[in-house]
Image (cartoon, helix red, strand yellow):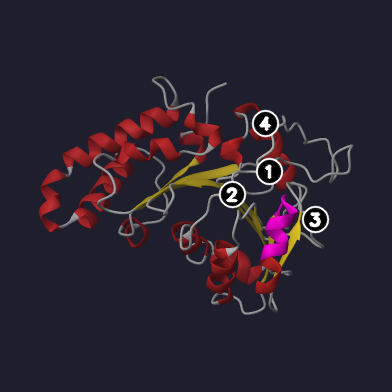
Amino acid sequence: MVQKAERVTAPQIPGRNSTGRPVGNVTRGTTNPNRMRRVDRWLAGPQAWRLRNAADPLVVDLGYGATPATAVELFDRLAAVRQDVQVVGIEIEPERVRAALPLQQPGLSFRVGGFELPVAGRPVLVRAFNVLRQYEEADVPGIWRLVQDRLSPGGLFIDGTCDEIGRRVTWVALDAERPLSLSISVRFGSFELPSDVAERLPKALIHRNVPGEPVHALMQAMDRAWLECAPLASFGNRQRWQGMCRTLRDAGWPVQDGPARWRLGELTVGWDAVAPLA
């Protein structure tokens, strides 16, 4: 059962709150196999250097949901990058952890916890998908800071949201100091306009998709560029998406990565270009 959401104002809390409970609320727990494939592909691709260079290859899947399928998939994908990776699936609901225990194996474990991250050591990667979406926007900075303070040098925290089967996905990447980027990844054929992904923006941005806010300007610029690149559709949506990304970059948007990522239906921009206005 999902408990009534409590406000999470935890940046000053070292570990657990005053009641001794894990920091956070029980989420709905909705999950599906292969739902996180797009963000995992990014972590095992352009961000793989973080895991390769880590003194301690500790990774946390925070709030993996009612079933541990996505935590197992994360372990399998990252083990291809570094065989000695240690993935810990953390859930605030004890029954979900008990159900996952039979799937433990060397390099993969599960435990009860929340945003305090009850693990020994500092993780190099923390993935929290469809978790912060169920909190108040005002809680996000405190939650971010609580997790960021646990990262290892060079570590990365991923706060993301996706649809039920991972066709429309967005995530914010943060290091220990600040947000770095916003990534958007979509399956071709799952949208009419790129801005359809707006309903899956992370909590920090979803309510900011209104005129005057930078993320709204990005959504509008994506749509315009997508429509301008319509002639490329005869070569396939992959070519059209790449054309959209080039158009955005040429217009001055801080587009990261390049065609190898764009062709996957992926777009990453620097956070400063979409950060909410005060």
Q: Which residue is mark 3?
A: 118
Q: Main secondary structure of the magenta part?
A: helix
Is tag 3's residue or tag 4's residue first in the polypeptide sequence?
3
Which kind of residue does numbered mark 3 sit on? Pro
Q: Which residue is mark 2?
A: 29
Image point (53%, 46%), residue name: 160
**Which mark is in front, 3 or 1?**
1
Which kind of residue does numbered mark 1 sit on? Val
Which kind of residue does numbered mark 4 sit on? Asp
Question: Which quarter of the figure has residue 108?
Answer: bottom right
Task: Find residue 149 and report its horizontal and vertical position in percent.
Answer: 76, 47
From the viewer's perspective, is 246 left or right of 80? left
Q: Which residue is mark 1?
A: 26
Q: Secondary structure at mark 4?
A: helix
How many angstroms separate mark 4 from mark 2 (CA)? Answer: 20 Å
What's the magenta region?
91-99
Task: Find residue 1 and report its horizontal and vertical position in percent.
Answer: 66, 43
Image point (44%, 28%), residue name: 214
How many angstroms separate mark 3 from mark 4 (CA)? Answer: 20 Å
How many angstroms separate mark 3 from mark 2 (CA)? Answer: 20 Å
251 magenta-colored: no
Label 2 environment density (alpha carbons within 10 Å; few <14, some 14–19, many ≥20): some
Task: Find residue 189 and report its horizontal and vertical position in percent.
Answer: 25, 51
**Which is nearer the eye, 191 or 6?**
6
From the viewer's perspective, is 39 left or right of 62? left
Q: Is residue 46 above or below residue 17?
A: below
Cβ–Cβ under 8 Å for marks 3 and 2: no
**Which is nearer the eye, 60 or 43?**
60
Cβ–Cβ under 8 Å for marks 1 and 2: yes
How many angstroms separate mark 1 from mark 2 (CA)? Answer: 8 Å
